[in-house]
Image: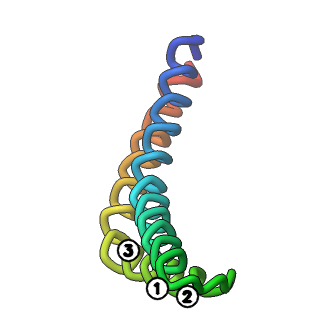
Amino acid sequence: MTEQYAIGVAQNAFIIALQIGGPLLAASLIVGMLVSVFQAVTQINEQTLSFVPKILVVAGALAFLGPWMATTLVSYMVGTFNALPQLAR
């Protein structure tokens, strides 16, 4: 295994991790910001108010994006495992 190949595999792993985790983090961030603005406008200072909407949005995003996430991970892992015999030479 060359250094370039190892760097490429690690780089692809980071890119896929960002692609999979990014939408969930972005959805959670947007909902958190909206709840924070709502709390600031209404002057409600309840710390636990933001957890329920975030959990619901992340669960909805997982339900909506779950098949795409699984397909992306499986295709990456299949490609990585298929390359293993060539690396052992």
Identify the residue shown where x is 66% and y is 86%. Answer: 46
Q: Badge 1, how many Cα within 10 Å: few under 14, some, many 20+?
A: few
Does dot 2 land on a helix, a strand or a loop? Answer: helix
Q: Quadrant of the C terminus?
A: top right
Residue position for label 3: 61
Against 34, residue 77 (above or below) is above
Residues under numbered marks 1 and 2 in contact, where contact means CB atoms less than 8 Å apart = yes
Spatial CA distance of label 1 from label 3 is: 9 Å
The amino acid beneath tag 2 is Val
Residue 79 in the image, given as x and y percentages of width and height: 40, 41
Identify the amino acid type marked 3.
Ala
Judge by depth and name the residue closer to the eye, 44 or 67.
44
* Residue 7 as seen in the image, left or right of residue 60: right
Which mark, residue 52?
Answer: 2
Q: Quadrant of residue 47?
A: bottom right
Q: Nearer the viewer, residue 60 or 6?
A: 60
Residue 71 is left or right of residue 36, and the answer is left
Report, in whole angstroms, how far the alpha carbon at label 1 lies from the one at label 2.
6 Å
